[in-house]
Image (spheres, rainbow, N blue to C red):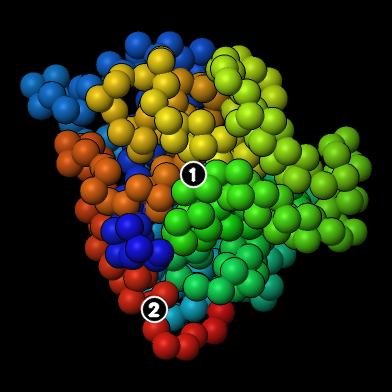
């Protein structure tokens, strides 16, 4: 499709919801046999065996807040976004939020709060969260702003409302950039796509906060760049096992152990794979492969879904999957509005 077409917008937002909804089944599982994944996905096609409606989790609940805030304010407004996160949590606390972020969401609902970034800064004895909660809701920033500088700045500030550790908010920047580039058609050239992400993240991670957090957490000086190099190495390999992907990239709740993994899932599934059904298209392969990694499956599939959906477009998503997932139809409508916002003649963050 054409760069930044409506189909790509719809694909990104809808596939993110699907990844979250279908991935919820396996979240936290150490090992997920591919047969179980394929059975779970085939049940979506078979109304008699159907799972009913698969509910979305915190990933989608918070992404919906980001979307509504960006649309209502026609740009990024931290007060409005923070209010929406707090209200959403208070109305529906059982969506499987991270155990730390709940404290932030409760504090954000206080009318006495003067700095909406302060509760996130207080997390984990002042070190801030490195969880993937900022990244899991970052895709809408790429759908609201055409300029990469706006995408990076707003994804970062949007994540910092809950995640003040650079290993948390830089993961959100990477995820938003991956969706941004995918929307432009950049995944047609996978090697250039990964090189571009590395170049962008070299700049994003070139600061003292990142170096300091990386030192404390005993990570490479530029942790996301280092992981993206690992993604590139794995891409160059003719075969790679699921165990190797998990050991090289991770499948956990930290942004560092899940955002590069999600990017790898998309790139690895550009071609048909022996372990996946021959009748699956690229988007179905990406979602199935993300689930088979186990660990933080809803979030990895949600992030991989957003990147893959922006690449393949809405036509690649099976209707039966859309029908089974709570919030998928809403995401489709929201994508149309974001497309209008993105293509407005001029806008600011
Ligand atoms: N929380 C989950 N899944 C757990 C199971 C939920 C279950 N289904 C249920 O209903 O009970 N999933 C969701 O959480 C992830 C996003 O988490 P987020 O928003 O980043 O939360 P938090 O609390 O900030 O961080 C997550 C955990 O990471 C560890 N951590 C983070 N920063 C840390 C630090 N500086 N030092 C030490 N540990 C740190 C903590 O264990 C946090 O609790 C997504 O998977 C979403 O789906
Ligand atoms: Mg979740
Ligand atoms: Mg998760």
The image quadrant where one finds the C terminus is bottom right
Using a 10 Å C-alpha cutoff, classify the residue at mark 1 as few (fewer than 14 neighbours), some (14 to 19) or many (20 or more): many
Please give the name of the residue rendered at 44% of the width and 80% of the height, measured from the top-left corner. Answer: 73
Up-down relation of residue 221 to residue 7 (above or below): above
Q: Give the x, y percent position of residue 250.
A: 65, 27
**Nearer-the-camera pick, 212 or 203:** 203
Q: Give the x, y percent position of residue 180.
A: 51, 60
Q: Give the x, y percent position of residue 111.
A: 56, 73
Q: Secondary structure at mark 1?
A: helix
Q: Give the x, y percent position of residue 90.
A: 44, 55
Q: Which residue is mark 1?
A: 303
The extreme bottom residue here reads 346
Seen in the image, is 298 located left or right of residue 318? right
Q: Secondary structure at mark 2?
A: loop
Q: Which residue is mark 2?
A: 343
Please give the name of the residue rendered at 69% of the width and 30% of the height, measured from the top-left corner. Answer: 233
Up-down relation of residue 121 to residue 289 (above or below): below
Asked if residue 331 can be seen in this view, the reply is no
Please give the name of the residue rendered at 51% of the width and 22% of the height, measured from the top-left corner. Answer: 293
**Nearer-the-camera pick, 76 or 153:** 153
């Amino acid at each position: 499709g054409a760069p930044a077409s409506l189909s790509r917008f719809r694909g990104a937002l809808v596939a993110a919801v699907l990844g979250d909804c279908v991935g919820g089944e396996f979240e936290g599982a150490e090992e997920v046999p591919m047969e179980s994944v394929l059975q779970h996905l085939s049940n979506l096609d078979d109304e008699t065996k159907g799972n009913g409606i698969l509910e979305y989790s915190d990933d989608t609940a918070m992404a919906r807040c980001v979307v509504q805030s960006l649309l209502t304010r026609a740009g990024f407004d931290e007060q409005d976004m923070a209010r929406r996160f707090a209200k959403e949590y208070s109305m529906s606390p059982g969506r499987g939020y991270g155990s730390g972020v709940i404290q932030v969401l409760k504090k954000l609902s206080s009318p006495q709060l003067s700095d909406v970034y302060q509760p996130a800064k207080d997390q984990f004895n002042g070190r801030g969260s490195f969880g993937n909660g900022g990244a899991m809701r970052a895709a809408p920033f790429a759908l609201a702003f055409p300029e990469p500088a706006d995408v990076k700045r707003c994804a970062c500030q949007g994540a910092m409302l809950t995640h003040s550790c650079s290993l948390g908010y830089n993961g959100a920047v990477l995820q938003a950039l991956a969706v941004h580039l995918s929307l432009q058609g950049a995944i047609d050239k996978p090697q250039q796509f990964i090189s571009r992400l590395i170049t962008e993240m070299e700049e994003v991670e070139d600061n003292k906060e990142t170096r300091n957090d990386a030192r404390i957490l005993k990570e490479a000086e530029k942790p996301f760049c280092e992981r993206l190099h690992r993604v590139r190495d794995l891409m160059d390999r003719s075969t790679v096992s699921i165990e190797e992907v998990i050991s090289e990239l991770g499948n956990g709740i930290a942004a560092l152990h899940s955002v590069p993994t999600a990017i790898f899932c998309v790139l690895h599934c550009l071609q048909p794979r022996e372990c996946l059904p021959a009748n699956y298209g690229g988007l179905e392969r990406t979602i199935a492969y993300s689930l088979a990694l186990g660990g933080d499956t809803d979030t990895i599939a949600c992030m991989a879904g957003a990147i893959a959906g922006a690449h393949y477009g809405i036509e690649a998503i099976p209707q039966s999957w859309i029908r089974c997932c709570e919030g998928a139809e809403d995401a489709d409508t929201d994508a149309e509005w974001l497309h209008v916002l993105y293509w407005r003649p001029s806008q600011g963050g």
